[in-house]
Amino acid sequence: MGDASQEIIFSQSYDPYGNVLNTVTAGLDSNYGFTGEWTDANDLVHLRARYYAPAMGRFMSRDTWAGDHLSPLSLNRWNYVKGNPVNLLDPSGLAPIGGGGAILGVTFSAENHATWSHANRMAVYNGVADVAFVLSDFLVEKGHDYIPPVQLVNRFFGGLNFHMTNQSTWKDANNNKQKDIGEYYYCARTTGEPEFYPPGVLCYLEAQEDGITPRLVIHEIGHVYNATVSNFIDKNPNVYIDNPYTPYDESLDPYDQLSVNGIFYENEQGERIQLAGLSNGEYIRFTAENSGLSFTENSYRDVNEDFADTFANWVVACTGGQGLLYDLPGNARREWMEYRLYLDLTRILGLPSLFNPDHCYDPLDYIE
C-alpha cells in the first residue's frame, strides 16, 4: 500500500498458504491480505462461497461439489487449490484458477473425450473480455475509481470456468441422469447447486464443431451473473434490503425482480405497456417488434432467458454492436439493466453507492 508520494506505507509477505511472514507498516493496517482478499479478525480469508484458514491450509467448510474421480485431488472437499498455492488461486472458494494461464479469470475443462478448439476458446475469451471491460467502464462512468477488468471478473464472479462435454445425456457427480441435451446445448452452471461443476458455463457440442460465439458466451454469463447475485443475497441478507425510494423490491435477485416488478414503458399514445414480468400469473412473451432487443439466444421465453438476453444485448450495445435498441422498449430495458447492474456491482464489490434517492430509478423517467 502506498501514499500519494508513492512511498510504501504498508506491506506484507506470506508463505505459499497465506501465513504472514513479515509486515512493514507506518502505523496503518489493511483488511485486505493474502491474494488481495478480505481477511477477518480471526485471520480467515473470505473467498465468497467459503472461508479459508491459512493456519490450517484448508477451507473451513466442505465444497458443495463432490469432485471428479478423474481429478483425484478434487475429491478432497476441504482442500485449498489442490495443494498448489504457488500456481493457483481460488477467488470463488469453489474452483481453483491459474496454472493453465487463466486469462481474464477464465479456465477451461472437458470430459468424455471432448476438446476445446481454438475457435471456441477465442469466442469465450472475446465474450468474457466484452463483459469485463464494459462493466469496468460502466463503474467509471458512474463516478467510481477504475477497477481493472480481470480484477473485476475475479472479485465479482470469482473467476469463470467453461466446461465442454460431448455426451448426449449429461449426468451429475453421482452419475444420475440429469437431462437429454441436443446438438448444441449451453447452460450456466452456478454456485449453490451441488450437482453441477464449479461455477461457470457447461457446453455441449456434437463432435468438434465450432459452435460457440461471443454473443452466446455473454448470454450464459448473464445466467451466472444472476446466480452470483442470488448466492450473495442468501449469504448477506442485511445488505440486500428493499429500498423504499424505488418501485422495485431490491431484496430480490434479478430473475425474481424482473418477474415480480416487471419493466414498463409508455408508448406514443400515452399507454403504459408492460414489456417484461408476470401478468395474470404468466410471464410476458414479447414479439420481436416490441422487445427492444436486437437478438435472442434462446427461443424459450421465460424470465431466466429474458434476463440473460437483456444482459447480452446491453453488453453488445455498449461495445458498439447491435444490441439493445434505442426505441422506447429498448430504452426501458437499458435503464432497468443499468439500475440493476449498479445495485449489484456496488454491493458485491463493496463500493459506496452514489445513488441519489431523489433521482432514483422509475420505469417512466427515461421516456421524454
Image (tube, helix red, strand yellow):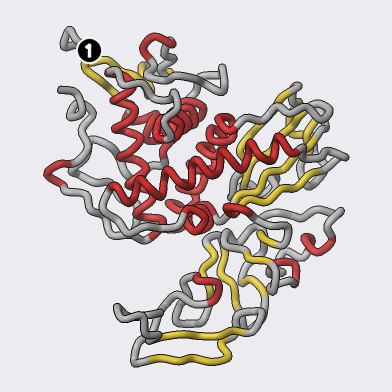
Considering only vertical position in the picture, is 203 above or below 28? above
**Count of numbered labels shown in the rendering:** 1
Given residues 269 and 283, the one toward you in this image is 269
Tag 1: residue type?
Answer: Asn
Residue 262 left/right relative to 50? left
Given residues 197 and 112, the one toward you in this image is 112
SS for callout 1? loop
- Looking at the image, which residue is at 86% across and 53% down? 70
Q: Estimate the x, y position of residue 57 in percent, counting from the top left.
A: 67, 78
Of all residues shown, which one is farthest toward the left? 358
Q: Residues within 10 Å of mark 1 (few under 14, many from 20)?
A: few
Q: Estimate the x, y position of residue 76 in percent, counting from the top left.
A: 77, 65
Considering only vertical position in the picture, is 223 above or below 174? above
Residue that badge 1 annotates: 267
Q: Estimate the x, y position of residue 364 in percent, counting from the top left.
A: 19, 26
Residue 8 left/right relative to 45? left
- Looking at the image, which residue is at 50% across and 85% down? 12
Q: Which of the 4 image quarters holds residue 319?
A: top left
Residue 67 left/right relative to 270? right
- Looking at the image, which residue is at 55% across and 60% down? 49
Residue 98 left/right relative to 157? right
Of all residues shown, which one is farthest toward the front? 5
- Looking at the image, which residue is at 42% across and 77% down? 31
Considering only vertical position in the picture, is 134 above or below 179? below
Given residues 67 and 114, the one toward you in this image is 114
Q: Estimate the x, y position of residue 112 in percent, counting from the top left.
A: 86, 40
Q: Quadrant of the C terminus?
A: top left
Q: Quadrant of the N terminus?
A: bottom left
